[in-house]
Image (spheres, helix red, strand yellow):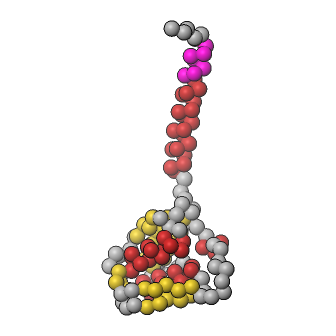
Amino acid sequence: MVNQPVRAQVHLFATAGSLILGCLWSAAVTAQTICPPFNLSAMALPMAREDVSLQLTEGLLQPQLEALLNRHFQVDVVDWQASPHHRWPADFRLQAPTWPELLERLLRPYRLAITLYPNRMAKIAYQPSGGGTL
């Protein structure tokens, strides 16, 4: 058995304790921080000058919109705060100059607004009364 001086053990416990408390404190502070919305105007636009397009099919809007967000906006989680019963009425190809503009054109008839967050999350909710923008 190797005897260590008491001072070394105290330093070991003090160091371990401060590391544990430091990790717990930073996790608690981080959990309280609200993730700010993502600025759509700061997104890089496609290099090509051609319009972007999305083929929509008759059916529920939510899965088609989530696929668009995943594919072109790198969104992993969608917080859907609107009715899941919104339907797209027919097969249709939607075109716009940019992906953000296409997304706005898609959401406008349903009076939905989107908030994109930098942590690869999006929130879809009804626009506040008074209009609102994307």
The reply to whether residue 58 is visible in this rendering is yes
Q: Residue at x 55, y 22 (%)?
A: 13
Residue 63 percent across, percent down from the top left: 39, 75
Residue 59 percent across, percent down from the top left: 34, 84
Residue 1 against residue 103 in the figure, above or below: above
The reply to whether residue 133 is visible in this rendering is no
Chain part drawn in magenta: 7-13
Whether residue 8 appears in magenta in the rendering, the answer is yes
Residue 72 against residue 54 in the figure, above or below: above
Task: State the image quarter where residue 57 is shown.
Answer: bottom left
Residue at the extreme left of the image, as rendered? 85
Whether residue 67 appears in magenta in the rendering, the answer is no
Q: Residue at x 46, y 86 (%)?
A: 55
Q: Residue at x 57, y 85 (%)?
A: 52
- Of helix, strand and loop, which mostly describes the magenta segment? helix
Instruction: Answer left or right for 63 relative to 104.
Output: left
Residue 14 percent across, percent down from the top left: 57, 23
Task: State the image quarter where residue 9 is shown.
Answer: top right
* 112 or 116, nearer to the observer: 116
**How many numbered discs?**
0
Q: Residue at x 54, y 9 (%)?
A: 2
* 33 or 103, nearer to the observer: 103
Residue 48 percent across, percent down from the top left: 66, 83
The quadrant of the rendering that contains the C terminus is bottom right
